[in-house]
């Protein structure tokens, strides 16, 4: 067979498994009807009937923009109003006292790419939890970087800070630099949110490691689900802890408007660098500007203007907040229904705090997922278990799903 692609462009010929299973779920819905199918595949907020939630406040604002405002290029770094709005949305009232610079990205994915490309060297490995969002691997392997992991929970089901420390030390010894990716709050796929005291312990540890001035330590906080975590802004408190960190301990935050503004397809977000050193923040800004130009140029102007308007106009902002809060409550009710039922029937799940997903650890996830498909229940098989997207399933179905999953596991 003739082959044209370069060596580094050769990857196994496979389709995205999530979209494949979602396609099967859509077929089942067509054949058997919506009420007979549980489609918990996609990480997008759905109404109870399975249709996509798209905030009215967002889309009426977008559609009211004049054509030129949508059609024009945005500056490569993003519009000033958008970048300010991104910081405000992301940090809420807990903006760290630090030098902060931001550059627009196409969603949170762009932020991950920026961090991996600019804060690791070829051949390095990034560090993250053993349950993780698979594009971290796609992004790193494409540019000759690896992924090392630590077990997210210890034997007692607690966040495994000892494992984080151990692996960080190892990588710092080998590489003298570290990029740690923590998807928190509302981790995909477990729904875990790192607690404020856990953040204290993590930051104390890295402050210690940064006493060796040769160590270059960066932590990427992937905050894709932050708007659907906790009550009001309580899950944003940890951002304040990024004040006064050592110069060689750098924080990068990947802000995404995909979930927070139901703007998945509009590809908008920002990568935000936080440092006690102006030089480090400035260097970050120009590195990201170059990467943006080299990869996607600029972001989507209409999306940027919409986010800025929803942040700066009081009336629009309160409409948006109201809508978001309504769906945040809906999500919490669904998750509570699933967790309560799982507890009642002794279905083991990983510790859930917030967000779109709940994970069920198990052997042979692929087989279990296939078994469940026979019963029109569509869940995503991961390496170490199943991912159930409560964001996409009605409360009523969230209540009945645990038992069906447990039955499939017992078989
Ligand atoms: C863990 C995690 N990080 C980041 C993202 C970013 O997505 P997007 O690029 O659509 O903003 C997602 C989306 O599914 C995610 O699950």
Image (spheres, helix red, strand yellow):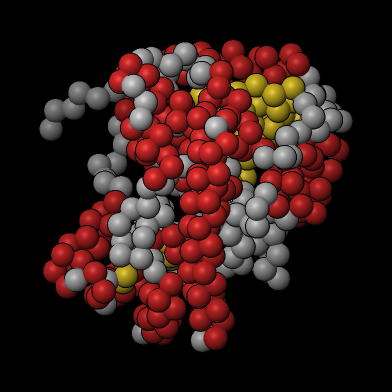
**Res 50 quadrant in image:** bottom left
Residue 247 x %, y %: 80, 24
The answer to whether residue 80 shows anywhere in this view is: yes
**Res 262 quadrant in image:** top left
Assign the C terminus to one quadrant of the image: bottom left
Q: Nearer the viewer, residue 375 or 185?
A: 185
Q: Nearer the viewer, residue 32 or 114?
A: 32
Residue displayed at 50% across by 30% down: 309
The answer to whether residue 176 shows anywhere in this view is: no
Assign the N terminus to one quadrant of the image: top left
Q: Nearer the viewer, residue 233 or 127?
A: 233
Residue displayed at 58% across by 59% down: 354
* Residue 99 shown left or right of residue 307 in the figure: right
Q: Nearer the viewer, residue 200 or 158?
A: 200
Number of numbered labels in the structure image: 0
Residue 34's place in the image compared with 138, above or below, is below
* Residue 187 shown left or right of residue 375 in the figure: right
Q: Residue furthest front?
A: 315
Residue displayed at 48% across by 64% down: 330
Residue 63's place in the image compared with 130, above or below, is above
Residue 381 x %, y %: 39, 62
Residue 214 x %, y %: 78, 24
Residue 232's place in the image compared with 309, above or below, is below
Residue displayed at 43% across by 42% down: 57
* Residue 74 shown left or right of residue 11 in the figure: right
Residue 7 x %, y %: 32, 26
């Amino acid at each position: 067979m003739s082959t044209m692609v370069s060596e580094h462009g050769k990857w196994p010929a496979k389709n995205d498994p999530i979209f494949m299973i979602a396609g099967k779920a859509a077929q089942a819905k067509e054949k058997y009807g919506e009420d007979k199918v549980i489609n918990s595949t996609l990480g997008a907020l759905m109404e109870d009937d399975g249709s996509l939630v798209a905030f009215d406040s967002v889309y009426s604002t977008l559609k009211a923009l004049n054509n030129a405002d949508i059609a024009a290029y945005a500056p490569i770094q993003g519009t000033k109003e958008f970048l300010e709005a991104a910081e405000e949305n992301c940090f809420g009232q807990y903006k760290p006292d630090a030098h902060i610079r931001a550059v627009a990205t196409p969603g949170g994915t762009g932020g991950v790419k920026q961090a991996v490309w600019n804060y690791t060297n070829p051949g390095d490995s990034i560090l993250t939890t053993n349950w993780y969002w698979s594009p971290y691997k796609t992004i790193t392997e494409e540019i000759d970087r690896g992924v090392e992991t630590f077990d997210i929970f210890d034997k007692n089901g607690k966040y495994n800070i000892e494992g984080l420390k151990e692996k960080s030390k190892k990588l710092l010894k080998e590489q003298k630099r570290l990029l740690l990716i923590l998807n928190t709050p509302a981790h995909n796929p477990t729904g875990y949110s790192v607690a404020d005291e856990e953040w204290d312990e993590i930051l104390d540890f890295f402050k210690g490691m940064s006493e060796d001035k040769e160590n270059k330590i960066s932590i990427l906080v992937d905050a894709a689900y932050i708007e659907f975590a906790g009550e009001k802004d309580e899950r944003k408190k940890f951002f304040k802890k990024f004040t006064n960190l050592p110069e060689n301990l750098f924080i990068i935050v990947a802000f995404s408007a995909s979930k927070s503004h139901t703007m998945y397809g509009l590809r908008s977000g920002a990568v935000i660098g936080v440092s006690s050193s102006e030089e480090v923040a400035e260097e970050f800004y120009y590195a990201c500007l170059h990467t943006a130009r080299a990869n996607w140029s600029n972001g989507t102007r209409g999306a940027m203007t919409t986010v800025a308007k929803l942040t700066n106009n009081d009336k629009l902002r309160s409409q948006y907040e109201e809508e978001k809060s309504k769906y945040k409550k809906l999500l919490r009710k669904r998750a509570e229904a699933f967790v309560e039922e799982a507890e009642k029937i002794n279905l083991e799940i990983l510790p859930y705090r917030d967000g779109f997903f709940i994970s069920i650890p198990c052997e042979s996830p692929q087989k279990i997922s296939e078994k469940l498909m026979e019963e029109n229940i569509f869940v995503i098989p991961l390496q170490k278990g199943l991912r159930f997207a409560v964001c996409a399933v009605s409360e009523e179905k969230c209540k009945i799903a645990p038992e069906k999953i447990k039955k499939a596991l017992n078989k």
